[in-house]
Amino acid sequence: MRYLKILCIALTFIFSIPYGTTVFADDDFEEHYEYDDGHGDREEHEDERYEDIGELIGWSTLVTIGVAALLFPTRKIMKSVITTFPQSKKLYVSFTKWLGKYHILIGIAALVLSICHGVLMYLHEGELESEGITGLGAVIIMVIAAIMGAVLFKNKKVKSLRTTHTILVTFGVVIVLFHIFLS
Ligand code: HEM
Ligand code: HEM
């Protein structure tokens, strides 16, 4: 629970950065705006603010997906890490347990963030271009992977479900990387 609180505080801090910077930017903007006759600049400024927040949420989604995916390598290399660095056993095991305990929550957070990012970017662009289509494709695959994950949660012994979940997630990550490369 303590770790969850730390995660929430860290996320709040990350998300407050763009608001803080836009507050400073707004002061400068107000000065210029007094001499401006149109509403265009203000609208453009608002639009840029949404784009910045959307991009930040996009990067946060990538980090959150990365944390959820860490479960696989940390479990795989557990044995060799423990034998090579026996003094780190306690820390390593509790970190892996933490990843397992909050995996579903972290995965759902990644999905929610990706949808928020997608909606903001779509509102900013006003149309679905190639970046949007690849992003949407990634989200759809992640949602299917999450549904498989929910079934896996109920039947953890079914190996094929675990493999399907992992393959879908990997496929989703490849499309996400392609999506970021395109933008
Ligand atoms: C798992 C899902 C997704 C992840 C991890 C993700 C991540 C990102 C990242 C990191 C960027 C680069 C931001 C930057 O240039 O600083 C980006 C850009 C973009 N994303 Fe996504 N995205 C996802 C889904 C979506 C969806 C569903 C849409 C829209 C339907 C979307 C639309 C866009 C657009 C339009 C850009 C280009 C922004 C620009 O360069 O002006 N993304 N995304
Ligand atoms: C960004 C999203 C996600 C990623 C990258 C991801 C990735 C992974 C990976 C790599 C594994 C390890 C597979 C293995 O041990 O062989 C796993 C296991 C699992 N995932 Fe996900 N997953 C995500 C979202 C979800 C969601 C949303 C759910 C549930 C609704 C879920 C449920 C599960 C379950 C139940 C397991 C087995 C855990 C265990 O053995 O204790 N995952 N996932």
Image (cartoon, rainbow, N blue to C red):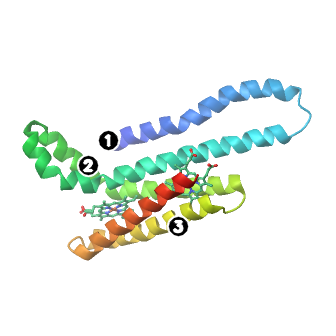
Q: In which quarter of the view is residue 150 placed?
A: bottom left
Q: Position of residue 44 (x, y in %)?
A: 77, 42
Mark 1 lies on residue: 3
Q: Are marks 3 and 1 in contact (CB under 8 Å)?
A: no
Residue shown at the point (34%, 68%) measured from the top left: 167
Q: Earlier in the sequence, mark 2 or mark 1?
A: 1
Q: The residue under label 1 is which amino acid type?
A: Tyr
Residue shown at the point (27%, 70%) measured from the top left: 162
166 lies above or below 24: below
Q: Nearer the viewer, residue 58 or 150?
A: 58
Q: Secondary structure at mark 1?
A: helix
Classify mark 2 as within 8 Å of ligand 2 or not, answering yes or no: no
Q: Position of residue 103 (x, y in %)?
A: 32, 56
The residues bearing labels 3 and 2 have C-alpha atoms spaced at a distance of 30 Å
Mark 2 lies on residue: 98
The residues bearing labels 2 and 1 have C-alpha atoms spaced at a distance of 9 Å
Q: Position of residue 40 (x, y in %)?
A: 84, 41
Q: Earlier in the sequence, mark 3 or mark 2?
A: 2
Foreground disc of the pair 3, 1: 3
Q: Secondary structure at mark 2?
A: helix
Q: Secondary structure at mark 3?
A: helix
Q: Nearer the viewer, residue 131 or 25?
A: 131
Q: Position of residue 182 (x, y in %)?
A: 56, 55
Q: Is residue 95 left or right of residue 182?
A: left
Q: The residue under label 2 is which amino acid type?
A: Trp
Mark 3 lies on residue: 137
The residues bearing labels 3 and 1 have C-alpha atoms spaced at a distance of 32 Å
Crowding around mark 3 (Cα neighbors within 10 Å: few <14, some 14 to 19, many 20+) is some
Q: Are marks 2 and 1 in contact (CB under 8 Å)?
A: yes
Asked if residue 149 shows in the view, the reply is no
Q: Nearer the viewer, residue 134 or 142?
A: 134
Q: The residue under label 3 is which amino acid type?
A: Gly
